[in-house]
Amino acid sequence: MYAIVRAGGRQEKVAVDDIVTIDKVAAEVGSTVTWSPLLVVNDGEVISDRSELGAYRVTAEVVGDASGPKINILKYKNKTGYKKRQGHRQKYTQVKITGIDKGKGK
């Protein structure tokens, strides 16, 4: 069984016991995060109807924080003496999927 969830502006394919890196979430290590899935596949059966998906919940435990690769941005204009250097490093959160459960409907 796996599900597609929207986490941090992107869609991720998740299954139980997967460790997924998502955009930074304001949650402490060890806390639980829940999502409502966009799609659930259970033994070849695809569930995409919104009324049925309302009953499903994907739960995850926050494992820790991570950082992406360093990106260097260099700007230069010839003959003007203009040089600018800037860097960026994206912050991520690693979560471990603990369950894809069908609970109570809305």
Image (tube, grey):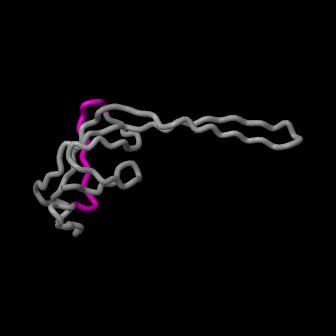
Q: Quadrant of the N terminus?
A: bottom left
Q: Residue furthest left?
A: 104
The answer to whether 51 is drawn above or below residue 100 in the figure is below
The answer to whether 104 is drawn above or below residue 28 in the figure is below
List x then y, in percent, for residue 17: 21, 42
Magenta span contains residue 20: no
Please give the name of the residue rendered at 21% of the width and 67% of the height, measured from the top-left corner.
46
The answer to whether 22 is drawn above or below residue 2 in the figure is above
**Residue 26 sits in quarter:** top left
Magenta span contains residue 39: yes
List x then y, in percent, for residue 93: 37, 37
72 relative to 41 in the view: left or right? right
List x then y, in percent, for residue 43: 15, 62
The total number of labels drawn is 0
Please give the name of the residue rendered at 20% of the width and 66% of the height, measured from the top-left corner.
47
Please give the name of the residue rendered at 11% of the width and 54% of the height, measured from the top-left corner.
103
**Residue 67 sits in quarter:** top left
Q: Quadrant of the C terminus?
A: bottom left
Q: Residue furthest right?
A: 79
105 relative to 73 in the view: left or right? left
Tell me where the magenta segment starts and ends, as one range. Answer: 28-40
Q: Residue furthest bottom?
A: 49
Q: Residue furthest front?
A: 44
Q: Nearer the viewer, residue 44 or 95?
A: 44
